[in-house]
Image: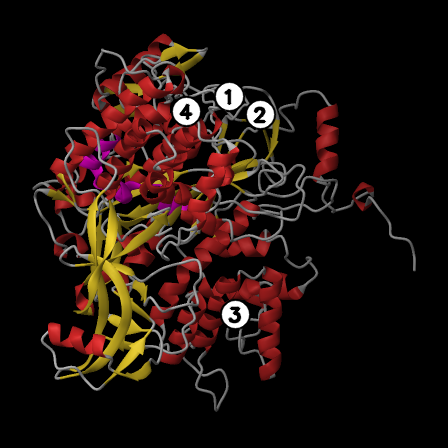
Amino acid sequence: MPKRKYKLYLEPNSTIKLPSARWKRETLDTSPLSSESCDQVTSGPYSADYETTSSSGHFDFPEYPDDTINLTLPYTECGREDAADIETMSPCGCLESDSDETFNLPTTSSGGLSVLQSSDVSQEFECDSAPESDPQVDSNIEDLPEDDPFGQIGFDTDMDSALISGVTTTRAEALLMVMSHAARHNITGTQLDDLLKLINALFGKEVLPRSKYLFNKVFKNSSDIVEFHFYCKTCKLYIGKQEDVKEKNIVQCTICSAPIEISTLNSASFFISIPIAPQIQTLMENPQIQNSMNYRYQRQQNEHVISDIYDGEMYQNLSKPGGILSDPANLSFNFNSDGSPVYKSSKFSIWPVQLHLNELPPKLRFQNVMLAGLWFGAQEPVMPIFLKPFVDQAKTLASNGVSWRKCGALVNSKIVGLCCCVDSKARPAMQNTTQFNGYFGCGFCLHPGTLVEKQVKYTVTATEYPEREANKMIADMEQAVEQHRSVRGVKGPSPLINMPYFDIVWGFVPDYMHAVLLGVIRQLTELLLNGSDQPYYIGSPNTMRVLENRIKEIKPPHLITRLPRPIAEFKHWKASEWRAWLLFYSLPVLNGVLQSRYVKHLSLLVFAVFLLLKENVTFEEINKADEMLFEFVARFQLLYGEASMTFNVHLLTHLSKSVKLWGPLWAHSAFVFENANGGLLKLFHGTKCVALQIVNKFLLHRTVPLFSTRFAVSEQVKNFCSELTNNSRVKSFTRYQDTTVLDNGRVTETTEEEKSAFISAEKVPPDEIVVHKRMVHKGLVYTSKSYSLSKRRMDCFGKLSDGVCGEIRSIISFPSECGTEIAVLFQKFHTQASFPLPQGYRFESHIRLISRGPTVDLIPVDRLEQKCLVLKTGDETYICDFPNQHERD
């Protein structure tokens, strides 16, 4: 075999592209680029002619140097392990090496950059794509045979035809099943290619698209396009979108003179913007979504109760006559941006901008998170650059709206962004204010901060500091630009002031997931376990053994996904584990181990947060929680010292107001976005072009619900797809209205105890009953006491509609006049108060001591209201209520 000839690009008249690695070496060895080889960037969106409007006037955005925003987000709850040891990666997520492989942006006929469509991503950038010589990937659509049923872009008109004669399965159904399989098992592009080839080989003809490229084209929505935004990697100057840099292969930064190659993504620095309007249109044309859009009007309402974001002052102000949300067609959204590490062995993270519509019921609201932008890299995003395209989209959505069809009629919905749920490192970057470790670092009030042991702390003083106001913060931004310095912690203008209806101060919330769970309660636990010379120390070996034994005895229901882990591993706990520790475990486990005054102090935080998380919160409860939180903060300084007065502790003083403005804490929590971040991390394989893989697969998955509604799909196929997307696997079940029993049951003779329960309920006891061990009622799984398959969990405790708690001894079905009736044999508990609060606070705690009642009652299943958690520590047994049914770990 003749030896391969290398460096063919050096041959005369060679058309082979110069490898990026060699280009970099040669470029760095030369003098600054001449005007002939490099075009300079003359302006960007933050140059002097960029004008912003506000209620206080007009002013210009300055250009921000690299050190303007010092932002490093912590690792989030959603992590990802990867076998590859990543040393260095390019901004697009590709390994930087001396490889000759290049990734070129598609060009228009004039040679400029084109807008990249979602389907083009798979053709040009997927890391596992075939080489250029593979005709199955790179064949032009126009060159496909005329009889190719999948040669068209978009939905094919012949999708409802059978795959072959004699088979009832249609092409649309087959594609839907393949897509469900691919999503369920998170298969790679190569695996999808092989699966398509396998199916076609089994049928002996091409019944499905022959490659993943053509497969993606079938599911493509023509409105789903993404835009690349380039910036200088060195000084973070914004270069522009594709149309800003047309017909330029290399540009030169006007600040640092660095050459920026924008023709290949290996060496370019960029982020991606995804249009929001097509995603909302696709969502709103889903029949299930349309049937739920009246939730905000049909739910139970009480003027004295806050039960969702609609009851908050901010939403109410926009819902008044003449307000934009007074029109039922108009919508609003909450948004978030937070980083998630991509690999365990590198610093690279994804930073998506995500949002969800508030007008959907909570379950659908949290299931349908949309993606508006994606930043990928080893450094945190420069927010003035990253947020600019998002704000531009928000302005268009608020003014022009989104048109969608309902029952054939065209509906136009104007959509406004209201609430931003981010942590305390992203918040100042978005507001363009001083971070919490600097003076005037609070974005909600004018507490200046106090220097304690060379660190800025937020101590409690006799001075009452005023809250910030949006118009005053904008005035501070103007002054900061004029004086070239920070003014009361404000460093300059934020792009978000141009976002219609968004309050630059109270449009943000002190997110309880980060501030309370990953902040205060983790800090407090660390103090208790590590303060060896303090009176509150509980970290000695003997004490730790007592704590570990108590934690081992806890058997939570399935509402709490994660089982309790040893307290010695608290540094590795996730936010959901801290939630369970704060609300349920901490007081019973620490009682009798930690001194009484510290337990009472902790109970202030536990009960206050529980009240603010309730499904229905009264204004009296909000005020009571506010008082408890203020007392907790004041006592925190007395018990643990000024050095412990961190910014997270200070944020507790603003928590109650966020509930008055935006509804219960669960309605504006970052939990839903952190969960969505974890979903994005499952949308790529390998190390190449991570951001492009994520965006491509995200948009592809978004088209599946619309695809299933445009074509006839049989119940058998629907059930198959539902089983793939649903993690539960139940072989035997029977539905009875709102209740589903999860087994066939066992027929037994009625015992004397059961007959007595029937008589007490004024029912004639049958001779035989059917005994079940599991059921689903109103979306919650309940088990009987005798259910033994789950050793570490107990789902047999519940609360009735009259507030009585107890244990489900048996789940039974029996014949009645109206057919088959489902009931439970329920042993009621006697409860009494536990963990009394300091004097002045009177309300029923959600944690109570219990003792078992002497009898078993027959209770109709409809009276079961919610599940409870029972835990035993030593000689005491406690029962705990859940604050709401919307939060699921």
Residue 421: tell me if it is visible. no
Which residue bears the numbered disc 4? 46
Would you say the magenta stretch is mainly helix, strand or loop? helix
354 lies left or right of 567: left
**Residue 504 quadrant:** top left
Residue extending farthest to the bottom is: 166
Label located before the other in sequence (1 or 2) = 1
Residue plotted at (12% across, 37% down):
619
Residue plotted at (50% across, 53% down):
696
| Mark 1–mark 3 distance (CA, rounded to whole Å) | 48 Å
Q: Give the structural element (helix, strand or loop) at label 1.
A: loop
Which residue bears the numbered disc 2? 234
* Viewer-nearest residue: 180 or 534: 534
Label located before the other in sequence (2 or 4) = 4
Residue 426: % across, % down? 40, 30
Q: How would you rate the neighbour count of disc 4 (Cα within 10 Å): few for under 14, some for 14-19, many for 20 or more?
A: some
